Structures are given as C-alpha cells and as structure tokens.
Image: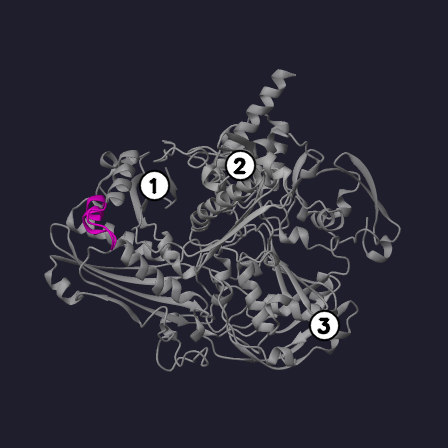
Amino acid sequence: MTIPYKPRMKRQFVGGYQPRIDADEKAHGRAPYADDMISDRNYPGLLHAVVLRCPYPRARIIRMDVSKARALPGVKAVLTYEDPEVLRMKPTNAGWTDAVDTVSYEGMMWRKFRDRRVLGDYATWAGDEVGVAIAAISQQIAEQALKLVDVDWEVLPFELDPLKALKPGAPVIHPETASTNVLPPDPVGGPDVFLVKGDIEKGFAEADVVLEMDTKHHNPTQGSLDPWCCMATWEGDQLTIISNSYATDQTRMHVSQMLEIPIHKVRVVSKYVGGQFGRGDTGDQPFFIFTALLAKIAGQPVKFKHSRRDSFHDTRQPAQYHCKVGAKADGTITALHFKSIGDIGAHADHSVFALKFAPAEISEAALAPIPNIKMESYAVYTDHIPGCMMRGVGNSQFNFIFGRMIDGLAEKLGKDPIALSIQNFGHEWGSCPDASLKAVLETGAQRIGWTEKRHQPGTGPLYEGFKRRGVGFSVHPGWHAEWQEERRGQVQVKITLNPDCTVTLDAPTVETGTGSNTCNVLGCAEALGFLGIQPKDIAWVAAIDTDRGMRDCVQTDSAVSFLQSEVMIVAAQELKKKLLDTAASFLQLKTDDLEIVKGRIVGAGKEISVKELLMKGDLVPISVMISRHPASQRTGVPYIASFAEVEVDTSTGRTQVV
Amino acid sequence: MVDSPRNSVNKKINLRINGEWHEYEIGRDLEPCTTLSAFLRERLGFTGLKVSCDEGACGACTIILDGKAILSCMMLAVEADGKDVLTIEGLAKDDPVIEAFAEQSEPGHGTALQCGYCTPGFVMSVRALLNENPDPTLDEVKEALSGNLCRCGCYAGIVMAVRHASEKIAQRARQE
C-alpha cells in the first residue's frame, strides 16, 4: 500500500516529490567522481601508489630491505617506517579524521585512543597497512615493486575472540593506549558502566516476570561502490588533495597537523562520492598522509586507490548484547539491564561511539519512562578487522537486542508487543504515551493488517503444507534532532545573488547520495520566495573545495539538509535586507518604504524588477555568508517503525519478506 | 592471437566506439593485458562506466558490445577487436532509459539513484534489455539486472524507472 506524504504546511517547493537535482547528470554518467577526475589522461605523469599490508594477525617488522623495489624501473618514490618524516609523525585515530565537525589533533574525540601510526612497524590485524608505501608510473609496476620488498616479520601471538582477549593474561594488543585489551574509560564514552538510572536490583525485585536474552551482531561491511581514492600534488610548498573523502575541511586539518604544514598551504577538494555508509569510521585514512609524502619525494602527482578488497576494510561494530528485563504482569517495565561486549578489532577508532554513546542517546530518546536502567559496555581489542559505524552509529546493534526484548517480554506476558511498546517507551522531553510512537505503531499495524495476522509463535496456519508466516516490527527513535547536533559547532551557508537574479548556493557538503543538495536547493528557493525564482535558477556548488573558505557540513546523522536549511533561512533574510538597501540607494528612497514581492521591488509609487535593478548597478553580486550554531531548544524526537511479514520455508529454512 | 607485448608490436585493433571506427596500436595505445574497462576509462576518457569491483561482481562497468550488455572489466580490450562498443556517452541525450532514471521520484518507490555510482551500469543493462524486449515482465527485469548492484538500495525506484522507460519507448513508437 502506498500512501503519499502529506506535508503539514503547504509550501511552494518543499514537501512534495521531485527528481534529484543531480539525477540528470548521474543518469547520463556525467557526474564526476574522484576516480574519474584523477586519471592518467587528466594528469600526465600521474604516479600510482601502493602500501604494504601485513599478512599476519599480529606482527612486528624487524628488518626491511627495499633496495630491489627501489631499483625496479618505473618506481619513483619509496617511503618506509624508518624515514625521518614517518618516524616523527604523531600517532592518530580514524575517529579524528572521520569526525562530523572539524577538530584539531589536540581536540579529537578519542584522544585517549591514538593507536594508529602512519606506516608503523607494528600490525594488529591481517590487513593493517604498515612499513612501506611505493609510487610508480603504473599500478602494475607499483604492485610488482611491493613484491620485491624483503620483510623480516616477528610473528606474534594473536587473539580473535573478544571473550578470551578480555581475560587477565591475554597478550595486550595496544599497550600504548590500554594496559589490558579493554579500552579504559574516556571523557566521551564514560566508564564501563556508562549509564545508571534508579536501582535495577530494586526494579527486578518489584517485577512479576524477569527475562534474559542475548544477541550477537555480525561484521557487515559498508562496501561503497566507489573505492576510496585520493591524489596528492605539490606546487612548491602548496599541497592539493583531490579525493572522495566526505569531509574536506577535516581532511585539511588532518593533513595540515600530521604533516605540520600551515592550513593555508593545504587545499582539499571533493566532488561526488559513490556512497559512504560510515566507511570512514574505522578506515585507513593514513593514506592521505603517505600519498602526500610520496608526491613530495617524487615531485609528481600521486594517486592512491583502494582495491575492492581494501574497500572491505571497514565494518559495522559486531557488538554482543546481553539484556535482562523485569516487568509487572500488567506490562509495565520495572528494570532494564544491557551489557555489551564489542569486538572492536585492531584499532579503537570510533568504536566507543557505537558501544556507549549511541545506546546512552537512545536511552534518553526511547527509554525515559523506565525507572531503573543500567548500561555497561566493554570495548575489547582483538586482532580482527576494526568495526564501528555503518548506516547508524550503534543503532542496528542496539535495535537487535531491543526488538528481541520487546518480543520476548510480550510473549512471556501474553501481551501485544505494540501495546507493550506504547505503554513503556518515550523520550525525556515528552510524556508517555508518546504521540509519535503511538502514531507510527498504530498506523503501521493498520497498514500491515497486524490484528488479523499476528499470532503466538507456532500457532499460525501452514501455507503449502510446510511454510509459516509471521508479522513483526522494529521501532526506533529518530534521535538526530537539530539540538542533538550542537557538537558540530557552527554550520555555514553562503548565498550569492547574481546580477541577473540567479543564485549561487554554497551549502557545502560532499554529495554522497543522501540528496541534501536537492533538499537545499528546494529549501533555498523557498527561503528566497520573495525573489520569485524557481529551483532551476539556483546553482548548488557541487565541488567542495576548502579554498572557498567555508567548512563543509559532513554527511552523517541524516542531519545535513535541515541543519543547512535552518541557516539558509537566516541568510535569505539578510540577503533581502541587503537587496532592499541597494534598491533604496538606487531609487533614492528609504529602505523601510520598500518591499520585495515576487522579484519586484515596490514602494512609494515606484517599482522595478530585481534583475533590472541589479543589471543597472555596478554588477557586483550580493553575497551573504552566515555561520550559525544549531538551535539548542529541546524539541524531543520523532519515532520510526518498520513492519514486515515474512514467510519461512520450514523444510529448508529459506526466509522471504512477503 | 596476441601472446606477449614483444610479439604484439605493430599489431593493431579496430573498435567501433559509439558509432565511429578507431584504430589502436598494441604497445602504444594499450597493452595486451589492458582490460576494456581500463582502456575506455583511462585512455579514452569514457568515465561514465565505473570500475568498482574490477572482478565482474558489481555491474558498474556494464557497456553494450554488439548489442549485448557485457562487463567491460571482464574483457581485454584486444578481445573487442572488430566489435561495436556502446558506452553511456553514446546514448542519445533524450534516451528514454536515461530520462526515466533521471525523472524517477514517486511515493512508495523513491528515486532510481542516490549516489549514482552504479547508475550508468544499470542504464546500459536496461538499454540492452529493452532493445530486445521493449515490454519486459517484472521477473525479466529482475533477471536482466541481477548482475548490477546498487549499494544505496534503490531497487524499487529502478524497477519503476524500467517500467517508465518501457512506456516512453512505446509512446515514441506510436508517435512515429
């Protein structure tokens, strides 16, 4: 059943169904991605870089001989862990380079967990990039040269099971950041027991039923189709990086501080990106640094591109959850205890975000009516591939146990899980039952035919003699409201009105597919309604270039469209004031006497179109740039529910969504 | 038969690309090991096709060769000697498949693309399908597109775009 969205308020451009502004160039194959731009054809003399990846789960380089690689014809630059510019480099964390806001080295979120080195000599998973990077005139020659590198490895004992890595005596993986394999408490994530509300023991004592359950998430990969790549090129001491990173300003800060060169000597450009999905959260950002150094050594532009295999080097955090829930016979939940163990793999990166930060936020946004809650988490190093965010910070992992808890409790109490959810859940800034939660669950139930189809496990009809069907749902708070994005700091937008009454919109964000470019153009047209223009009259600046002097708003949290749109409204009003001042001066009237209606300036019996006014003037575009913090007002959160009916072939186990 | 770069010197291949014949010299313009996808993108600048997996798994490099949708990363450029290559750049500006993908936006199905990286591959697979079968069933569409991955998950919109492209073709045929 398809029911079109109905906006609460009728607007001219926002609130309907429109093709994306980039759909035409994307459908023609004309939208430029980094890998299209950085080609031998466009950059004659382009070199191609490769990096050594450790073949062992844990190992240290004892000795390396690169002489044969260096001697191979076509090799132009070799950089190793023994080179002084590598040796003096600071340790880092991919959670820095993937931050949603630009932060300095000193201010990075996970500054206690700087366990990554650019081309270090110590590898903690079979795939860790270490030791040496090589640039050559072709990818094939660079790969051939890498095979000629002679490495003596000290192969070390390793651990792949987080439950064993937790135990005393387990070999410590990163002694420089954690004295055991469990990440210590930090200012963002808090202690191991990171959330205590009320008294769960008292809550369980008051309960009529107590239930325990476990979930174990796997390591899916973001698997963007557009492999990460970058090109670094120097002109004198000026470094330019073109990449498909989704954070240009943060990349500039990262490169500037790691290479210790001033910010104004670094330029970072990104255009279209073929999917992000959180791939940078645990990723191999050191490649920006060694690519820049190789380009400096060679004096030629250098490209580094992930292979398809390299593109699978980021994953979603595979948290194991245990939940204990207590409830009264009437369904009221009296206590909840969640404990998670995260196999964070070889590097800490953003993993605490998934394990502690996200569940704490979800608790505020969904579990507020429950009086007694305890949450604890243990982020455990292993020699696995690192794992953190993918399409949600830690939401999927938490939703998995949360959904099981709702279903398990409903089954035990003989209650409807929808009624149980409405009875128990809500956010800190509202009341229970929550109107949004009730609306999404009841509407979803009605649309899928919940009452007719829902049945107790094992009691439904058989289809074709061996198939069974069941309906279910998951419910989740949409917890990225504007005020929850305050940590990003100021959001910047610039609107330029050109003399012909067209508009150039700098709402800088790297387009990864989310469509905020389209939302922003529609929002801008709406905010500039007084100009009487259409969305086609607005050009959105797609090349996000740090030299334009603005910080880009990074595509995370499904938040960019509304964060930038809120700033655009303010910028549009400022633009209107400037335009009225210009008109008043031209018409020799007072600003207060004038108004702009649908592209015409009227007042005191005079009238002139905006275009006519601007074309008669000095032809200087009118620009307004606004930097604004996200609004801090606590507005609460809406809820999202997804329903599905599935059919299980009981003879084969094959499961299909009906 | 090209068996080594040394033996291939002075050997030439001819490709008809987007309607025009071109001659290329092995050793100068391409190597015997150059894949068709790499040759088209890196040497000739046809960057509409993408090299994403480079191992025949994702469909992003799909082009049309002698009327059939093929994976250009799974073929050597020399194997295309004497053949007719159609890349997305060779489709008409108002190609009904391109138009349908670009215009797609409707309740319950969404758009046919988000990040757009897989889109040229999908467009070429659909173009080849509709050339042979202008009014395919849903199962035929699914089968024809089973080698193309969209990581953004726009499959519902893509299926609708195929239907709309099919309608456009029928409509244009009626007008002619």
Q: Residue at x 39, y 57 (%)?
A: A485
Q: Is residue A371 magenta?
A: no
Residue B85, image x, y percentages? 73, 38
Q: CA distance from mark 1 to mark 2?
A: 42 Å
Image: magenta residue range = A418-434
Whether residue A197 is visible? yes
For disc 2, the marked residue is A535
Q: Nearer the viewer, residue A485 or A178?
A: A485
Quadrant of the image containing the N terminus of chain A: top left
Q: CA distance from mark 1 to mark 3?
A: 58 Å
- Residue at the limit of the structure toward the right, as seen here: B10
Mark closer to the chain start, 1 or 2: 2
Q: Are marks 1 and 3 on the same chain?
A: yes
Q: Amino acid at mark 3?
A: Ile
Q: Amino acid at mark 2?
A: Pro
Host chain of mark 2: A
Residue at disc 3, secondary structure: helix
In the picture provided, is B9 more to the left or to the right than B110?
right
Whether residue B140 is visible? no
For disc 1, the marked residue is A646
Quadrant in which residue A447 is drawn: top left
For disc 3, the marked residue is A297
Neighbours of disc 1 within 10 Å: few (<14), some (14-19), many (20+): some
Residue at disc 1, secondary structure: strand
Host chain of mark 3: A
